[in-house]
Image: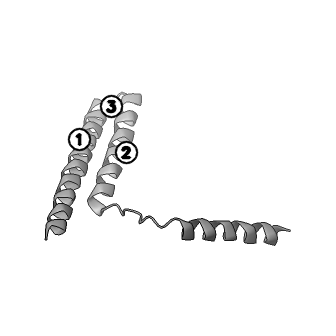
Amino acid sequence: MKDRYVDNMVDKRASTSSNNKKKKKKMAGPLRLGIALIILGAIIGGMGSIFNRESMSIYGFVVVVCGFFLYFVSYYYLEKMQRNKLKK
């Protein structure tokens, strides 16, 4: 009985993936790193505020700002590169 359920789920996944012909846009490494830094900085800042460690909160804020900066700079840089490729 379990095998029928698993086979049925696999068939459904295969049929939906073949119907979906849109290309998934892959996220570049710097964008992932920027998001990871934002999340990490938020966690560090939250821990600093919970344990009343101002230096830890400030460090978390700096990490969040760096992650934000990295994300947006790399996003616009990669977008500009793609536009230049399309022009050529």
Q: Is residue 53 above or below residue 26?
A: above
Res. 65 image quadrant:
top left
**Which of disc 1 and disc 3 is earlier in sequence?**
3
Q: Which amino acid does label 3 sit on?
A: Arg
How many badges with numbers are in the image?
3
Q: Is 70 or 6 nearer to us in this picture?
A: 6
Taking the spot 22% from the left edge, 46% from the top edge, the residue there is 66
Q: Is 34 or 85 nearer to us in this picture?
A: 85
Numbered mark located on residue 65 in the image: 1
Q: Determine which residue is flagged by label 3.
A: 53
**Which of disc 2 and disc 3 is earlier in sequence?**
2
> Which colour style is shown?
one colour
Q: Is 65 or 52 nearer to us in this picture?
A: 65
Taking the spot 55% from the left edge, 71% from the top edge, the residue there is 18
Whole-percent x, y for residue 76 in the image: 19, 53
Whole-percent x, y for residue 46 in the image: 39, 34
Q: What residue type is labelled 2?
A: Ile
Taking the spot 39% from the left edge, 40% from the top edge, the residue there is 43
Q: Is 19 or 55 nearer to us in this picture?
A: 19
| SS for callout 3 | loop
Numbered mark located on residue 39 in the image: 2
Gap in angstroms between the C-alphas marked 3 and 1: 19 Å
| SS for callout 2 | helix
Q: What residue type is labelled 1?
A: Val
| SS for callout 1 | helix
